[in-house]
Amino acid sequence: MTGGTWRRRVSLLAAFALVVLLAACGRDDSRIIEHRLYAMATWIDVTLPVRAAREHPQLIAEIEAELRVFERDLYPWTDGELARLNAALSAGEAFEASPALAAVLVSAQRAAVASDGAFDPGVGGFVELYGFHDAAAAPATRPDDAAIAALLASSGSIRDLAISGRRITAPPRRFLLDLGGIAKGAAVDRIADRIEALGIAPALVNAGGNLRVIGAREDRAWRVGIRAPRGEALLGTIELGAGDATSTSGDYERFRDSDGERLHHIIDPRTGRPVAHTEAVTVIAADAETADAASTALFVAGPDAWLEVARRLGVTAALRVDASGRIEMTRAMRDRIQTGTSGDSAIIAVVD
């Protein structure tokens, strides 16, 4: 069969590769409450003590307003700041970025260098070529080799940027930077920092599987579940402490099956093609921005390089599911995870 259908999972368990396991009974219901917002093409869950609404009645509205700014300015297919940056760089012009955008670009460039290009927002041209930039776009066939080769030859990398404070310059190239692999983590950190500065704890912010914990719960630890990439079962659960952040990247969030091939939104910037060797990666890090970029970088890096890339990014706790469903994880992740039944015969290997 030619073509296929685009699929996006939107149920509570399916939309997030990483799902918070919150108690729903007794005194806990009166102690914390989950606020749900839709922004940046995903659900954002902000879990706060009920007293936060009484003491800071405008907080959720302010968080939503801030998310709208991120949604506009860190997405390249709008009239926001990132789109203006791409236009300026493609025209060979310097650009004066806002402090927020400049900070994300610095972090993204650092991750691109550390991962030898496995993570690179310069992949935006390929995201557009495959139609992943628009939920309504569903090309009938995969791009041809000539189109991919032309983009590889003409596209600029984030590693090409010269960033001096807020001033951004680059050699003449076609730039379509897409910060989708780091922007949700950056937004989570921004929201979490705001909550923490107000002295609110315990709390948790989850943006489509990019998650950060603020403070510790008195009655129990925060726990999150890692979905199996195929099916609805859990691979296991992780206990998170105050300040922990985690992220999952998977090939099942935005994909289309075409002639027996899964075309999904995680594209290797070095080849211009969706990654075929990995189904999912989960990492734990000290902040959501690092976790977000690292889960993408390790996903793309693949079987021979993911451990080294994790080391360079300062990530010690990581789990990878390969294309056969085999699970491998670092010792630090093995110490954090309580494995479940994934419903298949996956082999679990501890590697370091």
Image (cartoon, rainbow, N blue to C red):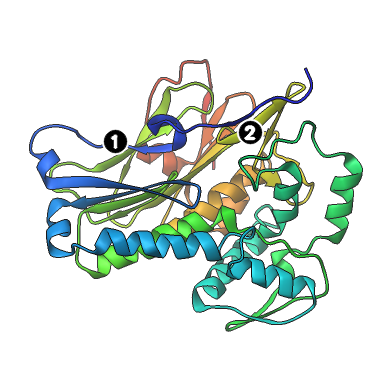
Q: Is residue 260 above or below residue 327?
A: above
Total tally of numbered discs in the picture: 2
Q: Residue furthest right?
A: 146
Residue at (43% x, 56% y) in the render: 288
Secondary structure, mark 2, is strand
Residue indicated by mark 1: 21
Residue 220 drawn at (x, y percent): 18, 41
Q: Neighbour class for label 2 at 10 Å: few (<14), some, many (≥20)?
A: many
Q: Amino acid at mark 1?
A: Leu
Whether residue 255 is visible, yes or no, is yes
Secondary structure, mark 1, is loop
Residue 32 drawn at (x, y percent): 17, 46
| Left or right: 42 in relation to 238 | right
**Quarter residue 160 falls in:** bottom right
Q: Is residue 200 above or below residue 238?
A: below
Residue at (31% x, 65% y) in the render: 62
Residue indicated by mark 2: 255
Residue 129 drawn at (x, y percent): 76, 46
| Left or right: 347 in relation to 232 | right
Quadrant occupied by the N terminus? top right
Q: Is residue 327 above or below residue 266?
A: above
Q: What is the C-alpha distance between the residues marked 1 and 2?
A: 26 Å
The reply to whether the C-beta atoms of the residues labelled 1 and 2 are less than 8 Å apart is no
Residue 324 drawn at (x, y percent): 63, 23
Q: Amino acid at mark 2?
A: Phe
**Nearest-to-viewer mark from 1 and 2:** 2
Quadrant occupied by the C terminus? top right
The label on residue 243 is: none
Residue at (71% x, 73% y) in the render: 161
**Quarter residue 173 falls in:** bottom right
